[in-house]
Amino acid sequence: MPENLKLNTFLQEFHSDCKHPECSFGFYGFAFGQSPFPVPEPVKRALIENADKGAYAGVPGIQELRETISKYNKRNFDIDVDPSRVYVGPGTKELIFNLLEILHGTVILPTPAWLGYLPQIRFLKKNYHMLHVAKNGKITPNDLEHLTLRLHDRQKILILNNPNNPTGLIYSRLELEEIADVCRKHDILVISDEIYALTTYDINKFVSMGKIYPEGTFVTNGLSKSHAAGGYRLGYVVFPQHATELKKQFKKILATEYTATSTPIQHAAIAGFSESREMDEYLEITRRIHEIMGWYTYEGLNRIDGVKTTKPESTFYLLADFNAYSDDFLANKITNSQKFSESLIQHPYHTALVGGDSLVLERTDFSARIAFIDYNGKKAMENYVECQPKTNSDKIEFVKNNAPKIVDGIAMIERYLKDLKKETNSKISHQKTTDGETVSIP
Ligand SMILES: Cc1ncc(COP(=O)(O)O)c(C=O)c1O
């Protein structure tokens, strides 16, 4: 079962099983990757106004939407994209799968990674290689080049997820330029999954790979994250320049697999991607709130003894490293990351996160993705508009008032780790009293 399905089922089954009345708070939800905000008003209105559009759309998407996406790319990412390079599909997940269907060569998958890619690569029986990120949480051109030289396929496909799920990090222009140099030299095409682009807290810092390596990059983006409309299922891909033959093949695949994307949803997307004061405000406010929640979560987790995390600059995730507790995990028979997430969801902790096994990390890597989205996004937006937090203490107040489960959830993670240590220490002293001397814990 795909990891996200497994997680969903696990949380639902587990929670209905907890008999303790003090656990009526549900669980602390650091696991799901879903924006907490409401769908933007212009998008909702456009969907309602176009509910009567019952005719099939053309395979690549309706022309007005492709033109709007072209302007959206110019406005936000300073890329000149002819509308003929834009293909619309039911979510970027589907489009990435379709791209992997038509592209030949070995896939290079940087890890940790979003849990959606690997099942697709395996399903399509493609050759693939992992490329573990460096200490700064990003892949380096040197590591990419070294790996590339070991691969036999002439063409390679790098899946670059920028901004990144799970780290929340973004690649700088210089980092992208250096990666692009390696790609040009070694025949590497890039699928640049930029679904979180417009959640970047300082939007001026985001650079699209489509700008840096336009001749070899497929950029995917959509409504799901920045526009909080994952359920609308609308994504797009911008093809590289001069990819006429690939576009033809892609069109065939789309026509064969799903004919076209829902027409009313495409009209809703036109409103979402068009320039308007309402959309600009929505994107700005939601970015600010993601930033505050990310900052609070980062500060809160890094204050816990032995916990280190990435510092998110975008998205609603960070990657937390709990490996300083490896000995304690092992002493308590928590031998891999899946057992770690299972033990944390158990009574009394009820805290859900995504463990390393679902991030394509080694099973014994006790890192985990923390999503900071467990709050009422609509209320938080209203409160933000009413009174914008400016100082750090305003921000702390804002999180406490709007996202108490994030505050309590971080405290619960700390309690879990303290209990784990206590448990280890009591095992050690038990060993001491039974054996008369300290023995190493297996
Ligand atoms: C990195 C990344 N790419 C793609 C997707 C899927 O996006 P869509 O809803 O457009 O299929 C997600 C969703 O969680 C994601 O985190």
Image (cartoon, rainbow, N blue to C red):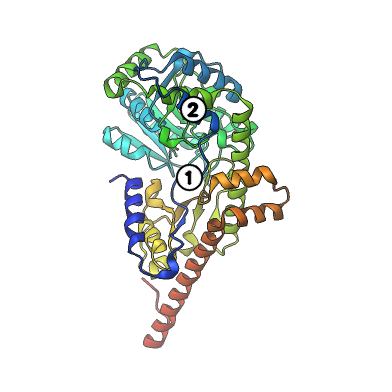
Q: Residues within 10 Å of mark 1 (few under 14, many from 20)?
A: many
Left or right, 302 with respect to 253, comes to: right
Whether residue 231 is visible to the viewer of this picture, yes or no, is yes
Figure check: 125 above or below 365:
above
Q: Which residue is mark 1?
A: 166
Q: Residue furthest right?
A: 391
Q: How many marks?
A: 2
In this view, the residue in front, 275 or 2, is 275
In this view, the residue in front, 438 or 391, is 391
Mark 1, secondary structure of its residue: loop
Amino acid of disc 2:
Val
Q: Quadrant of residue 337?
A: bottom left
In this view, the residue in front, 90 or 132, is 90
Residue at image position (37%, 51%) is 357
Q: Quadrant of ligand 1?
A: top left
Name the disc covering residue 318, or none. none
Q: Position of residue 284 (x, y in %)?
A: 63, 36
Residue at image position (59%, 49%) is 293
Figure check: 63 above or below 161:
above
Q: Quadrant of residue 127?
A: top left
